[in-house]
Image (cartoon, rainbow, N blue to C red):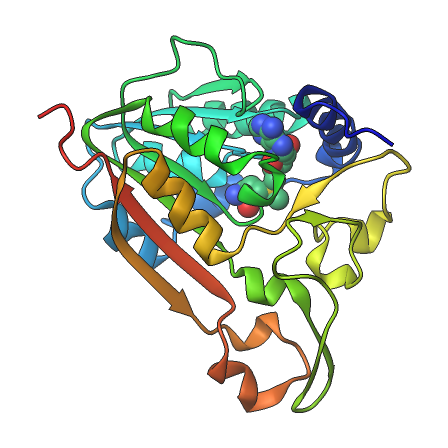
Amino acid sequence: MSEPPVSEVVRQNSEYWERLAPHRHGEPVEFFLGGGSALTDDELAAVGDVRGRRVLQLACSVGDEALTFAQLGADVTAVDIAPSHLATGRAKAEALGLELTFVLQDMMTLDSEITGFDVIYISWGGLCWVPTLTEWTRSVAGRLNPGGVLVISEHHPLWEILTVRGANELSVSGDYFGVDRDGYADPLKAPEITRTLGTPDVPHRSFVWSLSSIVTAVLTAGLTVRSLQEFPVQEMYPGLGEQAMSIPATYLLTASDGGRHA
Ligand SMILES: C[S@@+](CC[C@H](N)C(=O)[O-])C[C@H]1O[C@@H](n2cnc3c(N)ncnc32)[C@H](O)[C@@H]1O
């Protein structure tokens, strides 16, 4: 069977996500009003002061991180393919009195006017929906301002393919080098909402990008890797115990255009 084109993969993924999106709400408005941040301390440190800077969030979902960027004073554009996610984000922005631009777009084929950003950010189950990584990093690199930064803050690909079987017991349930994920062997790796709603009965495809493939794609796009950190998160390996602190669960990569245009 021949491979469907990327546009067809994205169309299917859009339908899949729109089935889930009306049921995903993210943090309540009160969270943000009370000073809550949807960005982690490590992310905030990586991004630096965003006041007055143009930030693009890709695969923004309900926009929680985008709202935090806006609260910090950034000029934010947030992109997603699920209309209901964007509607939720817009409603929260209005309730918070924040002006953000939420745009319904495929992050693989962004309009040419979506460009000129100081920070481009993707996180927490966003990158796994990119079907062709080098194409994506090239597109991102071309939309950064001189000195601008790409920030990828994600589930670690090793976490994606490991399943906890018990205390100190892990098994390999996916293929670290396989890229194209054929469903979720471990339901813990599927979008959290599917644990209550079940899996929408529509085709969808996500991908596991190894760390080397990410770094290679970033470098191929002409960007310079500024930092790459890996973190353990015990709760992401529930039931494994203390050993979970000896393996990575997330990573944070920053890359800049290295002053190409400087
Ligand atoms: C698990 S969410 C991750 C985002 C967010 N950081 C979060 O924690 O909720 C994945 C998002 O990717 C979006 N998505 C998937 N493929 C996309 C594409 N090609 N372009 C834009 N957004 C996409 C989905 O609609 C969904 O909102």
- Kindly indicate the quadrant of the structure image that contains residue 98: top left
Please name the residue shown 53% across and 25% down the image.
107
- Judged from the image, the quadrant occupied by ligand 1 is top right
Where is residue 236 shown, x and y percent of the image?
59, 70
Where is residue 20 shown, x and y percent of the image?
76, 37
Image position of 179 with respect to 115: above or below: below
For this view, does 163 lie left or right of residue 56? right
Please name the residue shown 30% across and 48% down the image.
254
Residues 152 and 92: in front is 152
Please name the residue shown 78% across and 55% down the image.
184
Q: Is residue 255 visible?
A: yes
Residues 162 and 217: in front is 217
- Quadrant showing the C terminus: top left
Where is residue 179 shown, x and y percent of the image?
64, 49
For this view, does 46 lie left or right of residue 184? left
Q: Is residue 26 visible?
A: no
Residues 118 and 180: in front is 180
Residues 261 and 76: in front is 261
For this view, does 147 lie left or right of residue 62? left
Determine the residue located farthest toward the right in the rendered image: 201
